[in-house]
Image (cartoon, rainbow, N blue to C red):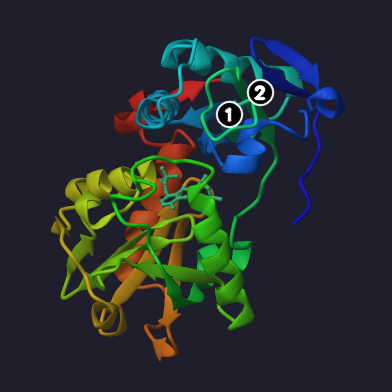
Amino acid sequence: MAIQEVDYIWKNGELVPWHECTTHVLTHSLHYGSGVFEGIRCYYNEETGKSYVFRLQEHMERLIRSCKIALIDIDYTAEELCEATLEVIRANKLPSCYIRPLVYRGYGNMGVNPAGCPTEVIIAVWPWGAYLGDDALENGVSVGVSSWRQRSVNAIPPAMKSTASYMNSILAKMEALEHGYAEAILLNEDGKVCEGSGENLFVVRNGVLSTPPLSDGVLEGITRDTVLCIAEDLDIPALEESLVRSDLYVADEVFMTGSAAELTPIGAVDGRTIGKPGEITKAIQAKFFDIVSGKEEAYLDWLTEV
Ligand code: PY5
């Protein structure tokens, strides 16, 4: 899926033409994965003609928390980054898009110690369709448990959305595709289910929704939190509880969540059929898409109009 180019990228306070927004090959983060980033979506409401960014402030706050964990000094507040996001969406005249803020350590020093490398901040936007395909949102995907393990909470912390973490995700994703699956599920070293290469995970059994707790080593997903709020609203009992591999096989419904993947049903795990998207998955998914596009009055607080 080639990236769709637009006119500008926001970099360190300025709008820079897309092709001029480049970096030196000796950039610290390019060598050592020392960056942190976010993934956000902006949705268009066809009825009102308005565009909304979903949970923008929460994403920027998580970016600042990732910087804190990574000991990156960033000169911008979450509020300033929110403003910059709106500026770059408007400049590119995009009704809907994916938003990729990245904070990285720039050019200046080639040691592992990042002292002397400037902090660089970019916010890129581009039109991006369904991450795992349109058909995936409707009919679900098959996934496989990876032979790669989730990083320990004492290694590259799963709570930090760092560029370095995604080497693990890339290994798992490529292995999954090689095996004919659309996505990988990672277990931690204790055998507890964690998450996909870029998504949180939920299962439904006997009418109860559950998702692994953050302490098992998962990213504190904003879509995950959204789903937990929707479940409460729809009176669906929901738990954060540890899950093991076989819990996935015997679940009535399984789905993944993420800003890129949105809410994608899972039809099979390791060749064990789960089935077509179930009632609870479909109800939560429908509500999710109504909320993000501004059709749910009670959730307008989560939206920032562009
Ligand atoms: N877990 C991992 C490892 C992720 O990469 C992501 C998001 C999530 C969970 C879900 O978090 P949230 O709901 O806050 O988005 N991944 C990014 C995204 O934009 C990058 C994916 C390519 O969805």
Query: Image point 41% across, 73% down: which residue?
Result: 277
The residue tagged 1 is 104
Q: Residue furthest right?
A: 19
**In this image, 274 relative to 181: left or right?**
left
**In this image, 258 relative to 204: left or right?**
right
Name the element at disc 2: helix
Q: Earlier in the sequence, mark 1 or mark 2?
A: 2
Residue 72 locus on image (x, y percent) = 45, 23
Mark 1 CB near ligand 1 (8 Å cut) = no
Front label number (1 vs 2):
1
Q: Dot 1: within a 10 Å radius of its alpha carbon, few (fewer than 14), some, or many (20 or more) residues?
A: many
Question: Splitting the image into 4 quarters, where does residue 79 fall?
Answer: top left
Residue 196 locus on image (x, y percent) = 43, 62
Q: Is residue 59 above or below residue 231?
A: above
Query: Image point 37% across, 57% down: which residue?
Result: 151
Res 287 label: none
Residue in the foreground of this view, choosing between 152 and 254: 152
Q: Is residue 259 above or below residue 95?
A: below
Q: Is residue 48 above or below residue 139?
A: above
Residue in the foreground of this view, choosing between 90 and 184: 184
The amino acid type found where label 2 is placed reads Ile
Q: Is residue 277 above or below residue 232?
A: below
Name the element at disc 1: strand
The amino acid type found where label 1 is placed reads Tyr
Task: State the CA–CA distance, disc 1 to disc 2.
Answer: 21 Å
Residue in the foreground of this view, choosing between 106 and 294: 106
The residue tagged 2 is 89
Residue 150 locus on image (x, y percent) = 37, 62
Query: Image point 39% across, 40% down: which residue?
Result: 160
Q: Are marks 1 and 2 in contact (CB under 8 Å)?
A: no
Quadrant (top left, top right, bottom left, bottom right) of the C terminus: top right
